[in-house]
Amino acid sequence: MAKRRQARPAEILQAAIEEFSENGFAGAKIEAIAARAGVAKGTVYLYYATKEELFEAIVRDRVSPVFKIVSGMVKLWPGSQTALLKQIIPRFYSEIVENDMRRMILKTLISESDRFEQLAKFYHKEILVPARKMLKNIVRNGIKNGEFRDAPIAIEPLVLVGPALTAAIWKMTFERAEKLDTKRWLDAHVDLVVHGLKKVN
Amino acid sequence: MAKRRQARPAEILQAAIEEFSENGFAGAKIEAIAARAGVAKGTVYLYYATKEELFEAIVRDRVSPVFKIVSGMVKLWPGSQTALLKQIIPRFYSEIVENDMRRMILKTLISESDRFEQLAKFYHKEILVPARKMLKNIVRNGIKNGEFRDAPIAIEPLVLVGPALTAAIWKMTFERAEKLDTKRWLDAHVDLVVHGLKKVN
DNA sequence: ACAGATACTGACCCGTCAGTCAGTATACCC
DNA sequence: GGGTATACTGACTGACGGGTCAGTATCTGT
């Protein structure tokens, strides 16, 4: 023991991600997180004052960075905006729908939004607002270059990724009643969006 | 007291709807439900064995009936399928996004899906499957009569209402960070769907 | 090799709340 | 008006788990 001062936080965070992902926020036990990290319960509290703070650390450490990668990709895109959407939307599925940790974060944000008012604001500012801006740019570029119609989606572009969120919800909630066919869902989604935006004259 | 045997269940159910809607499933206290119903805690348990059972009773009593009304409307629709969608989609918003009770039910289903495995199956069978069938019929009819393209949406038609779900989630989770402009969102949604399905030759 | 600082431990504390049940009040029938 | 069934009550129990802290181990500098 001891001397681990710098390694500990990361170890505990990793253990927490696993425990939270498997059991959700409410179901996760601090003692179980400690056990996974090979540490006593009290030690967890040396680094994170509350269960909430531990959860917030996960969001800050693991969610924000991912978005920056996607967002960087957009800036360098050489092809058409339609092709870009066909690239981006599946990305939402692999990052949100198919990723245990991020699905769990989403579920927690929904379930415990009262408890995490602060975190919801953080998520909104760091993820939702930038995502909207990114999508808005894509749509506007498409309108400008004649690919897309001048549609109200340009004002409320997050509507474009709504079905992806719904797929994630389905997976969390109804998977045992009926398995989601992610690929089929994604295909329908992309097709709808592409044709919904396309300019027709 | 006494003699209320037939009135009690409905009174308690109503009180439970209010308490659950205001505080969510986890935050709702049986004692508070009892107080609202003007009854002692023990009395609640004479009619509903557990908190879960009480919640299930709400879903069974209040959710299924609504769907039947919407679904009936579709059968009698005289106009175009496009016009029908323009009628139906806003309906999803008033029934799900703008209704406290149903938003709370949705949130609970998501948050407590493990606890309510049985109920999730019920909801799937009674709501989701019929909703999908209804939407599938609309899309197919539209394809048949030349209004719509033959799109993959015909196979996964729930994608069409995905953005509505997302709006409900936003309202539950990020309302305090940024108020959802439901009408604007709805307009973008309907526009996307209508143009996404439209046949163009 | 000693002292003080730092890291860690885990038994315990404590608030919460779903669910129970012995006791009380009311209705109903003869 | 007495006796029994039925409805209701609310103090209590028991499980749970987040958070605490007095005690122990290890490290570090001199």
Image: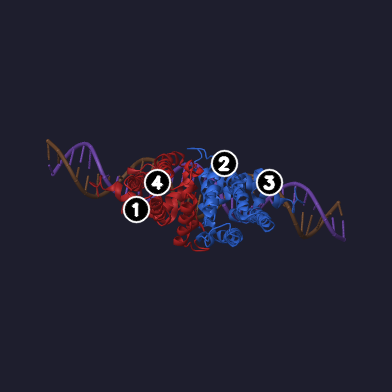
Chain colours: A blue, B red, C brown, D purple
Marks 4 & 3 on one chain: no
Residue B28 appears anywhere in the view: no
* Residue with the mark numbered 1: B15
Instruction: Select label 3 or label 2 by which is in front.
Output: 2
Calculate the distance from the C-alpha at mark 4 to the C-alpha at mark 2.
34 Å
10 Å neighbourhood of mark 4: few (<14), some, or many (≥20)? many
Residue B55 numbered mark, or none: 4
Residue B9: x and y in percent read: 30, 46
* Residue with the mark numbered 3: A39
* Residue with the mark numbered 2: A183
Instruction: Select label 3 or label 1 by which is in front.
Output: 1
Secondary element at tag 3: loop
Secondary element at tag 1: helix
Residue B70: x and y in percent read: 35, 48
Instruction: Select label 1 or label 2 by which is in front.
Output: 2
Calculate the distance from the C-alpha at mark 4 to the C-alpha at mark 1.
11 Å
Marks 4 & 2 on one chain: no
Q: In which quarter of the image is residue A126?
A: bottom right
